[in-house]
């Protein structure tokens, strides 16, 4: 329904899609300007940072496109409008994720895909079948990881009701963090996004293998291939939290 309503005004959709593309492109412009003054960042070249930027951009864009609207759960819990979704014979999570589905978010994905394509063209990487498969797998698993964080954050709102910005600090903030190489951050922060909130599996660890770089201290070598496993665990945990949240929902009584 939301897709049909969006495409009913094609000129408006094209403008909003182009606007979203340009807005996210300015994030990359900041990196371009930075490399206009330096030759490297934490030992990484411009093309290597572009690969990191593109991988996290596509992953976050896919998650935001497919499950981004779940952040509205807190508002619907407060005003009782979530009851309408519960009356329908369909999955609550699917309905909430599809609520106000915004096809214009594809502009972010398209922009990040172009950056990945440019980075792959410029990088001097000895591509192997493993590396060629690892890149798209990491992007898909990264989308699942971001989606799991979004769903878990939305589930917490069944109790807190107004915690959308807390979730955004991990999703939007994590996306910004992962645009830069891990070597510019402290080892404590790197370990935090490996062992606590495993956002490093979105792009940092897989990209290190693709680029032929060593993993950070304290991280096992096999972790560069662990994105599918970590994504599966995080999605399962997010599902359990969501289920607990829906069971705790008691409506507003209105």
Image (cartoon, grey):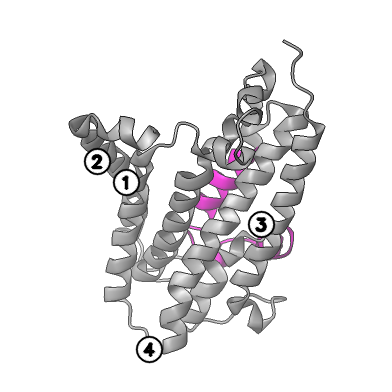
Question: Disc 2 to disc 4, how far (Cα)?
Answer: 35 Å
Question: Disc 1 to disc 4, how far (Cα)?
Answer: 31 Å
Question: Disc 3 to disc 1, how far (Cα)?
Answer: 25 Å
Q: Which mark is residue 123?
A: none
Q: Are marks 1 and 2 in contact (CB under 8 Å)?
A: yes
Which x, y percent locates residue 239?
70, 50
Q: Which residue is mark 3?
A: 235
Q: Are marks 3 and 2 in contact (CB under 8 Å)?
A: no
Q: In the rendered image, which quarter contains the C terminus? A: top right
Q: Are marks 4 and 3 in contact (CB under 8 Å)?
A: no
Q: From the viewer's side, name the closer residue of 63 and 204.
A: 63
N-terminal of the pair, mark 3 or mark 1, is 1
Residue 131 located within the stretch drawn in magenta: no
N-terminal of the pair, mark 4 or mark 3, is 4
Q: Which residue is mark 1?
A: 107
Q: In the rendered image, which quarter contains the N terminus? A: top left
Give the answer, above or below, for where 179 lies relative to 93: below
Give the answer, above or below, for where 31 lies relative to 103: below
Main secondary-structure element of the magenta-colored stretch:
helix
Quadrant for residue 185, please give it: bottom right
Give the answer, above or below, for where 183 lies relative to 149: below
The magenta segment: 167-196
189 vs 175, left or right, is right
Question: Disc 1 to disc 2, how far (Cα)?
Answer: 7 Å
Callout 2: SS: helix
Q: Which mark is residue 126?
A: 4
């Amino acid at each position: 329904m939301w897709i049909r309503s969006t495409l009913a005004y094609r000129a408006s959709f094209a403008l909003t899609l182009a606007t979203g593309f340009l807005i996210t492109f300015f994030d990359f412009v900041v990196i371009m300007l930075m490399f206009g003054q330096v030759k490297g960042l934490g030992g990484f070249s411009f093309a290597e940072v572009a690969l990191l930027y593109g991988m996290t951009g596509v992953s976050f864009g896919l998650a935001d496109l497919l499950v981004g609207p779940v952040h509205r759960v807190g508002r619907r819990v407060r005003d009782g409008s979530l009851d309408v979704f519960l009356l329908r014979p369909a999955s609550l999570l699917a309905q909430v994720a599809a609520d106000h589905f915004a096809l214009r978010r594809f502009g972010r994905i398209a922009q990040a895909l172009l950056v990945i394509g440019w980075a792959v063209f410029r990088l001097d990487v000895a591509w192997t079948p493993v590396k060629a498969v690892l890149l798209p797998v990491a992007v898909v698993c990264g989308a699942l990881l971001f989606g799991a964080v979004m769903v878990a954050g939305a589930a917490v709102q069944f109790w807190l009701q107004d915690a959308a910005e807390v979730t955004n600090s991990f999703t939007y903030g994590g996306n910004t963090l992962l645009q830069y190489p891990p070597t510019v951050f402290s080892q404590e922060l790197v370990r935090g996004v490996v062992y606590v909130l495993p956002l490093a599996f979105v792009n940092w660890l897989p990209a290190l293998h693709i680029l032929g770089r060593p993993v950070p201290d304290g991280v096992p070598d096999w972790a560069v291939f662990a994105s599918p496993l970590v994504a599966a665990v995080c999605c399962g945990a997010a599902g359990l939290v969501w289920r607990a949240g829906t069971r705790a929902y008691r409506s507003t009584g209105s």
